[in-house]
Amino acid sequence: MTDLEISDNAFALEITGDSMEPDFKEGDYIIIDPDEKPLTGEFVVAVNGDYQATFKKYRETGEIDEFGRAHFELIALNPDYPKMCSSKQEIQIIGTMIEHRIYRRKR
């Protein structure tokens, strides 16, 4: 449930792993809308050529491929993880994050 206007295709995901720390921690939930085109600086869920899903920050590189599509990078907030680039590997954007839910964390 959300109070945002979302498409019928929107869905929620639970964050796993630490690639997006410190802003997104394991156990947080994000609402993803596949009908929202990402803008540079927004967060997206994507799938790579190995069909593994990932949640990262989206940034267009300014390069255009031979089909007129803009190349982009996916960047982890945790500097221990490398960035992914659509000019070097197959990446498909699944949707754009429209909400981030943080629940109480016990110490």
Image: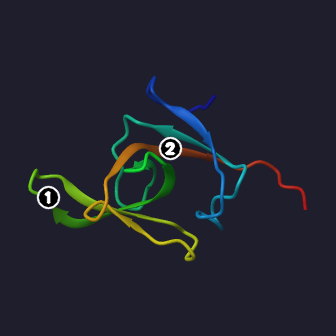
Residue sitting farthest toward the left: 66
Q: Residues within 10 Å of mark 1 (few under 14, many from 20)?
A: few
Residue with the mark numbered 1: 65
> Looking at the image, how many numbered discs can be counted on the residues?
2
- The residue nearer to you, when weighing 7 against 83, is 83
Where residue 14 sits: x, y (%)? Answer: 65, 44
Residue with the mark numbered 2: 98
Label 1: element kind: loop
- Image quarter of the C terminus: bottom right
Where residue 7 sits: x, y (%)? Answer: 43, 27
Tell me the kind of residue under disc 2. Answer: Ile
* CA distance separating discs 1 and 2: 28 Å
Front disc: 1 or 2: 1
Q: Is residue 41 above or below residue 93?
A: below
Residue sitting farthest toward the top: 8
Tell me the kind of residue under disc 1. Answer: Asp
